[in-house]
Amino acid sequence: MSGPFDFTGQHVFVAGGTSGINLGVAEAFAKAGAKVTVLSRKQDKVDAAVAKLKGHGAEAQGFAGDVRDAARIEAVFAEAVAGFGELNVLISGAAGNFPAPALGISPNGFKSVVDIDLLGTFHVVKAAFPHLKKPGGSIVNISAPQAYIPMDFQMHVCAAKAGVDMITRVGALEWGGFGVRLNSVVPGPIEDTEGMARLAPTPEAAEATRQSVPLGRYGTKDDIANTCMFLASPYATYISGAIIPVDGGWSLGGVAAMSATMKRAFMGQ
């Protein structure tokens, strides 16, 4: 175990846990002693992530599956629990995004993002529920500031992530009686992620985004992982239904700077 959190022997499931922020979260739980299961669409990414987690000395397993496929997700959870026992923690972070003006998003493009982000989150949390420790189970949905801040070129993501936060809130209402907590973590600008590469695709955009953060820096994957571990820990047993920005204060007004640079990058304005 390293750091202030100890998840020794606990089973932590990370949906989308083979890359980016979600892999960083999986690694943090692995270092804290957890048995970690990861889920992603591609088997090669699953295998690479499992090897990396085992490199931290953790017990790890992984499964390939598309969060849009409810039957496959139910089967994955059954297999995961057969291997590592009931779930203590679920991190649901599968997501899709591409910047595009609203008039340039095809019906299939809009549907694809909603199906991955919103429907996928529903499939994951619903399939996990029967296998969660009760009481004591913790679900953390990885959301996005687009859930509550309108952003240029992000109509599809804004719609989907707003729904994800409502899954968190309604789940907290309905499942609190079972002793299961649901919360959303909302990453702001996080360095070395595919999402920021897409949303701030030029050096100018990246620097403008950094300057728009009140704390004056990009966040790290550890910043998100630490928040997830706190929410899953005994320190947070009375927190449920919360939407928690982890963004250095960026959501207080920084979106205007990103919007301006995105317009220049994508539309020449």
Image (cartoon, rainbow, N blue to C red):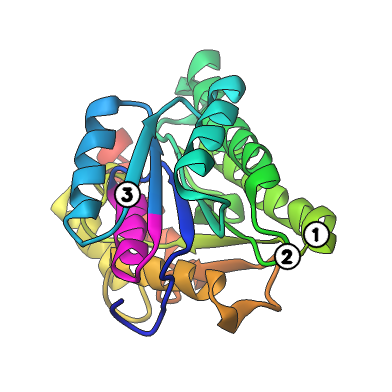
Nearer-the-camera pick, 11 or 202: 11
Pointer 1 and pointer 3: residues touching (CB < 8 Å)? Answer: no
Q: Amino acid at mark 1?
A: Phe
Residue 108 relative to residue 205: left or right: right
Q: Give the crowd class for mark 3: few <14, some 14-19, many >=20 residues within 10 Å.
A: many
Is residue 202 or residue 135 the one in the foreground? 135
Among the two numbered marks 2 and 1 on one chain, the one whose residue lies closer to the N terminus: 2
Label 1 CA crowd tier, 10 Å (few <14, some 14–19, many 20+): some
Task: Note whether 66 is above or below 182 in the view shown.
Answer: above
Lower sequence index among marks 1 and 3: 3
Label disc, if present, on residue 60 of the rendered structure: 3
Instruction: Locate the C terminus by quadrant.
Output: top left
**Mark carried by residue 135:** 2
The image shows residue 193, relative to residue 134, as above or below, that is above
Query: Quarter of the image holding residue 225?
Result: bottom left
For the stretch drawn in magenta, what is the main secondary structure? helix
Disc 2 to disc 1, how far (Cα)?
6 Å
Q: Which residues are magenta?
A: 20-35
Q: Would residue 10 be seen by someone viewing this image from the given angle?
A: yes
Asked whether the beta carbons under mark 2 and mark 3 sit within 8 Å of each other, the answer is no
User: Callout 3, which amino acid?
Assistant: Ala
Marks 2 and 1 in Cβ contact (< 8 Å) = yes
> Disc number at residue 178?
1
- Per the image, label 1 sits on a secondary structure element best described as helix
Question: At which x and y percent is residue 233?
Answer: 53, 75
Label 3, secondary structure: give it: strand
Residue 167 percent location from the top left of the image: 70, 47
